[in-house]
Image: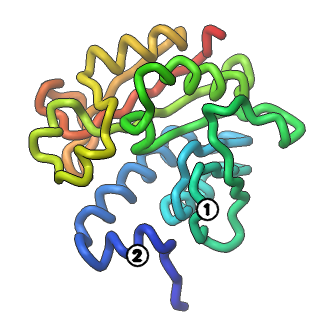
Amino acid sequence: MNVQLGSMHAASFATDPKHLAFVLARYHFVARMLQGQDFVLEVGCGDGTGARIVRAAVNNYVGIDIESYVCVPGHDYAMVNILDGPLGDYGRKFTAAFALDVLEHIDLIDEDIFFRNINASLEPNGTVIIGTPSAESQIYASELSKLHHCNCKTGEELRSILQKHYRNVFLFGMQDCTIHCGFDQMCHYRFGVACNPKE
C-alpha cells in the first residue's frame, strides 16, 4: 500500500529526513501518554501526518490548525485558531489535548489566552501535553526557525507557565528521538505533561 504524507511533512522528508523521524517520535510519546483517552484534541495539527500515531492509540481525535493544510484523509480536522476562543462545536469536552511545536509561535501576551481556551475545551480533570524546542537549543536553530520562534522556554519557564494553569506538572527532555529526564539545560526539546486545569 502506498501512503501519502501530508504536504508539510513530505517536504520535510525530502529535504531533511531525520527531522521527520524526530517529529514522529514526539507523536509516539504523546500516543503513549494518552493511550486509551476517549476524546483528544490536537492544537496545531499541521498536515495531520503525525496524528496517525495518536489516532491509533485513542478513541476519538480532533485536530485544529490556523492554516488550511491538505490533511491526511479520514481525520477530523477544522481550521480554527485556539486564540479566538474555546472549542464548543463538538457537543462535549475533550478528555485530553496536546500541542507540539506550537507554544514557541505564541506571543507572550497571548500565552494565558492560549492555555485558558484549551482548558475551557477540556473536562475538569483533563490532561494537556505541550512539546516545544528549548530556549537553549535556539543557538543551533536555522535562521527560518529563529524568525518564527518568539517564545521558546527554559525548563523552569515551561514549568512556571504550566503550574500557573494546572495543578500537576511533569517535565521531560528530548534529544533527537530519545525521551529522558536528564540535565535540564542540555535538552534540545521539552515536553510538559500537565493535569487538572485550575481554570
- Comparing 167 with 109, the one in front is 109
CA separation, marks 2 and 1? 16 Å
Task: Tell me the quadrant of the picture where the C terminus can be found.
Answer: top right
Residue at 40% x, 44% y: name it. Answer: 101
Q: Which mark is residue 68?
A: 1
- Comparing 84 with 26, the one in front is 84
Q: Is residue 28 left or right of residue 76?
A: left
Quadrant assignment, res 10: bottom left
Residue at 28% x, 41% y: name it. Answer: 179
Q: Which element carries disc 1, helix, strand or loop? A: loop
Q: Which element carries disc 2, helix, strand or loop? A: helix
- Comparing 193 with 12, the one in front is 12
Q: Which mark is residue 194?
A: none
Q: Nearer the viewer, mark 2 or mark 1?
A: 1
Residue 21, placed above or below residue 26 = below
The percent coordinates of residue 109 (x first, y second) are: 46, 19
Q: Residues within 10 Å of mark 2 (few under 14, many from 20)?
A: some
Residue 23, placed above or below residue 122 = below
Q: Residues within 10 Å of mark 1 (few under 14, many from 20)?
A: few
Residue 56, placed above or below residue 178 = below
Query: Which callout, 2 or 1, points at the residue further toward the start of the chain?
Result: 2
Quadrant assignment, res 81: top right
| Kind of residue sitting beneath label 1 | Ser
| Kind of residue sitting beneath label 2 | Ala
Q: Which mark is residue 10?
A: 2
Task: Tell me the quadrant of the picture where the N terminus can be found.
Answer: bottom right
Residue at 36% x, 36% y: name it. Answer: 104
The percent coordinates of residue 79 (x first, y second) are: 68, 53
Is label 2 in contact with label 1 (beta carbons under 8 Å)?
no
Q: Residue furthest bottom?
A: 1
